[in-house]
Image (cartoon, helix red, strand yellow):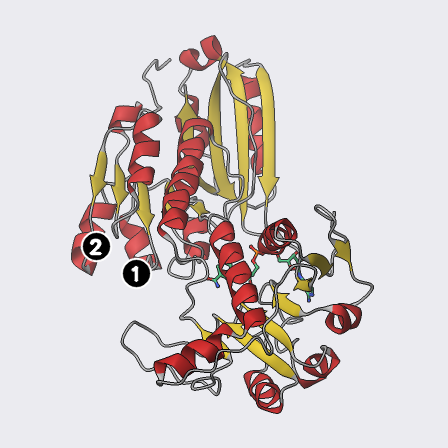
Amino acid sequence: MSKKKTSYPKHDIRILLLEGLSQTAIDTFKAAGYSQIEVHAKSLPEDELKARIAEAHIIGIRSRTQLTPEILAHGRRLMAIGCFCIGTNQVDVDAAELAGIPVFNAPYSNTRSVAELVIAEAIMLMRGIPQKSAECHRGGWSKSAAGSHEVRGKTLGIVGYGHIGTQVGVLAEAIGMNVVFHDIETKLSLGNARPALSLDELLERSDVVTLHVPETAATRDMFGAAQIARMKRGAHLINASRGTVVDIEALSAALESGQVGGAAVDVFPIEPKGNGDAFVSALAGKDNVILTPHVGGSTLEAQDNIGIEVAAKLVRYSDNGSTLSAVNFPEVTLPEHAASHRLLHIHRNVPGVLSQVNEIFGKHGINIDGQFLRTDAKVGYVVIDVSATDLQAVDLKEALMAIPGTLRTRVLY
Ligand code: NAI
């Protein structure tokens, strides 16, 4: 019977961080006891990426590094991917899953940043500041209170009362606004916010409407001429959600007719691919519109939070096996395993694997302290805790690796 250790000591786990991630990511790994951290300020050329990923157990990237099936095939030791950003399109998450590699991201680290911008824009729009600023820039001067309002006592209508919508509601109430919201799910109201009876009722009541829905088939063009017509005449619209949610032509017409008093738009149906590319929109050139280049969530604080959030998820997976909030993987939340060894077995979701796993333990007379299984359409993830002494007795890892359909196994001592 083999007594060789099969789990990696932390100081041998190699972490490759690309694209100038926040120092908070590095600090989080170090605080968790990881020391082999290779940091690059930029993304790597393809050949170098292949060479570096071949050595890495964990890789952290932002949106520039493309992790294609070809690149992933070089990640022979790779056990987890962290996207230190919101989106994960740059990773072939299906190929990663079939290689037994969970992918983590940070969908909510910039919630506060978006919420602050929305509140600032609500105040600016209610005061008519965009028009006044534009006029001053042109050398004009019209000092007048006409059309300028405080937000105190006005009604903010929040469409999509999720992470951002609720934060916006809390901040809006703190400055004295009344908050109504509309969501397709039943949501617990925070503060004095009240659910509207319907989207139409929200539109009829609100002085400022702000959109915080995800991009889905149902939200595509959900805000068009009909919804705009339901708004109070002269009310304001804010969209920092997704560009496909608002019919820009309809909004443009309503801004010209005065049906919408002003708008703040951060996201567009078509956005320039990179900095320096031309931005074209029917809203450009309108004094009563605040245009921003999809920066709702872009603050240095959000970057710091992203560093902590994603690094913490990677540490948790490496230390404990938890895959909670992985974007491509069966999600398992695991208790600590101080008194036991933990085996992680990732396999193709084909019939019979679990019984073969259990057979191995039965054959060796090993008592299982705890077992956790989650599957999705492609992959099964089973975590088995056994008493520490049991695991020294046999080389279970090798036996588990031999089960047909196995993608990866790990042992956590
Ligand atoms: P979330 O998932 O926490 O909340 C979305 C809410 O919208 C949920 O409560 C959901 O039930 C609701 N919803 C879904 N479909 C709906 C419908 N048809 N009608 C009404 N409600 C509906 O998402 P989170 O984090 O609050 O993000 C909201 C939006 O903001 C997303 O589209 C996200 O992509 C975008 N976002 C934009 C950023 C920017 O830089 N401008 C930064 C971060 C997020």
**In which image quadrant can residue 255 be found?**
bottom right
Depth order, front residue of 413/20: 20
Which residue is drawn at the image coordinates 56% and 46% (left, top)? 349
Pick the quarter of the image with the C terminus: top left
Label 2, secondary structure: give it.
loop
Q: Which mark is residue 64?
A: 1
Q: Residue furthest right?
A: 197
Q: Residues within 10 Å of mark 2 (few under 14, many from 20)?
A: some
Tell me, yes or no, whether the two marked residues, 2 and 1, touch with CB atoms within 8 Å: yes
The answer for how far apart the CA atoms under marks 2 and 1 are is 9 Å
**In which image quadrant can residue 69 be found?**
bottom left
Residue that mark 2 sits on: 42
* Label whose residue precedes the other's in the sequence (2 or 1): 2
Type of residue at label 2? Lys
Q: Residues within 10 Å of mark 1 (few under 14, many from 20)?
A: few
Which residue is drawn at the image coordinates 18% and 49% (left, top)? 51
Label 1, secondary structure: give it.
loop
**In which image quadrant can residue 246 be found?**
bottom right
Pick the quarter of the image with the N terminus: top left
Please say whether residue 116 is visible from this viewpoint. yes
Residue 98 drawn at (x, y percent): 45, 50
* Quadrant in which ligand 1 is drawn: bottom right
Residue 189 drawn at (x, y percent): 74, 48
Image height of 92 relative to 341, above or below: below
Which residue is drawn at the image coordinates 49% and 60% (left, top)? 117
Please say whether residue 355 is visible from this viewpoint. no
Q: Residue furthest front?
A: 143
